[in-house]
Image (cartoon, rainbow, N blue to C red):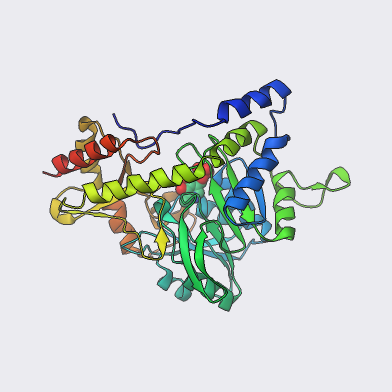
């Protein structure tokens, strides 16, 4: 069976972890935490990194640290993981949805403005499956309306976006946009710590607030005095040790992921009835996951194709199911009667193929042949 994803730990991970064990620095203090935060923030072009225990709490911490709370609205794509909506709801705020762009599967930036109200505080773009959101128009909109941008770059380590803004006409890495950018380092991400996450930012007071709320909001100078409600979202030095070793390999990881993405595109280009995620001219995707959407003419939905691929030795995963389809959110009175047809379409007809960085060219070719056979 060719798995959807497997972590590859071939750098200095074992050496760094051994150092933690030998020195006893196994909790959330130790040299690897800061080294990991600094190296990842620098890679993203940011001044500060605040490591946390996973990507979900990275979003939660960013929302809380920006002071978003009861009565506030945050605009986010319906086609994403529930972590985005939860981050807003845990703060007492309300998630407001926009549909997916049918081609890139990322949030349809053209639909955001119509969702802005007097209660909107922030926009949360999510770079889906490693392909950047069209950030320039989104950032302009946020600026015009005085909104914060919380970037969810959990799936887009090392992906790049060509910004044509007058002050920087350049390729910028995802994680570089808005007030705060959030990452996950779960085992299927390009940089992994097993479980882990980080918020990166250029804003020093915000970084301080992120650090404080991450660690129970202890009063500086008077430990065990708390003026606000914090969280324990700390990452361990052992996880950061793995993370630092992973960051050291990021250039090779991104290059290999892009090569796998291109190989799938070429191997599947002659197959009728499927659509891959295109790479826009302003984007360099990292193909975190290589997704495809079936044409209705195939007569197969994503679940049926997955069932045919499994006996051919190919593991797959279904696409996200829109937030407007989540019982846990609907029963709280959210999104009643709202329609998001593009997200519904790709959720029903989309799935993703094996995409791990350790995948060989022969495995990519074998998966492509299996897809062709399953569709026949
Ligand atoms: C877009 C996105 N945001 C947030 C998360 C949450 O990250 P974690 O699983 O580390 O909590 C994920 C998880 O994969 C994700 O894909």
Residue extending farthest top:
22
Q: Residue 263 or 231: which is nearer the viewer? A: 263
In the rendered image, the vertical position of residue 300 relative to residue 140, given as above or below? above
Quadrant the N terminus occupies: top left
Q: Quadrant of residue 316?
A: top left
**Whether residue 233 can be seen here:** no
Residue 336 at what x, y percent from top left?
A: 41, 63
Residue displayed at 72% across by 24% down: 24
Residue displayed at 51% across by 44% down: 250
| Left or right side of 15 for 216 | right
Residue displayed at 81% across by 52% down: 227
Residue 349 at what x, y percent from top left?
A: 25, 52
Residue displayed at 57% across by 40% down: 196
Residue 179 at what x, y percent from top left?
A: 62, 63
In the rendered image, the vertical position of residue 138 relative to residue 197, given as above or below? below
In the rendered image, the vertical position of residue 76 relative to residue 169, given as above or below? above
Residue extending farthest left:
376
Quadrant the C terminus occupies: top left
């Amino acid at each position: 069976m060719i798995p959807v994803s497997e972590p590859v730990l071939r750098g200095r991970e074992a050496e760094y972890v051994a150092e933690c064990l030998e020195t006893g620095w196994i909790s959330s203090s130790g040299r690897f935490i800061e080294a990991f935060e600094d190296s990842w923030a620098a890679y993203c072009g940011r001044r500060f990194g605040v490591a946390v225990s996973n990507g979900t709490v990275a979003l939660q911490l960013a929302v809380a640290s920006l002071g978003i709370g009861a009565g506030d609205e945050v605009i986010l794509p319906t086609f994403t993981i529930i972590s985005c909506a939860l981050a807003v709801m845990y703060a007492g705020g309300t998630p407001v949805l926009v549909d997916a762009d049918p081609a890139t599967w990322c949030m349809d930036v053209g639909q955001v403005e119509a969702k802005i109200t007097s209660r909107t505080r922030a926009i949360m773009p999510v770079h889906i499956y490693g392909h950047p959101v069209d950030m320039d128009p989104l950032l302009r909109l946020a600026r015009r309306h005085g909104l914060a941008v919380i970037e969810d770059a959990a799936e887009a380590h090392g992906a790049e976006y060509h910004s044509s803004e007058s002050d920087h006409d350049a390729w910028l890495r995802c994680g570089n946009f808005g007030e705060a950018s959030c990452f996950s380092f779960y085992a299927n991400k390009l940089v992994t710590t097993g479980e882990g996450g980080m918020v990166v930012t250029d804003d020093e007071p915000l970084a301080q607030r992120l650090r404080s709320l991450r660690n129970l909001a202890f009063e500086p100078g008077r430990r065990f005095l708390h003026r606000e409600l914090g969280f324990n979202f700390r990452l361990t030095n052992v996880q950061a040790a793995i993370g630092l070793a992973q960051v050291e390999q990021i250039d090779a990881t991104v290059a290999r992921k892009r090569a796998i993405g291109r190989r799938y595109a070429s191997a599947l280009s002659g197959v009728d009835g499927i659509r891959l995620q295109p790479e826009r001219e302003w984007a360099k995707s990292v193909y975190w996951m290589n997704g495809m959407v079936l044409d209705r003419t195939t007569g197969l939905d994503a679940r049926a194709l997955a069932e045919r691929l499994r006996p051919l030795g190919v593991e797959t995963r279904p696409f996200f199911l829109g937030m407007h389809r989540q019982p846990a959110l609907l029963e709280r009175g959210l999104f009643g009667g709202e329609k998001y047809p593009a997200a519904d379409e790709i959720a029903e007809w989309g799935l993703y193929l094996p995409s791990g960085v350790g995948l060989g060219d022969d495995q990519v070719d074998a998966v492509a042949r299996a897809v062709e056979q399953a569709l026949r």
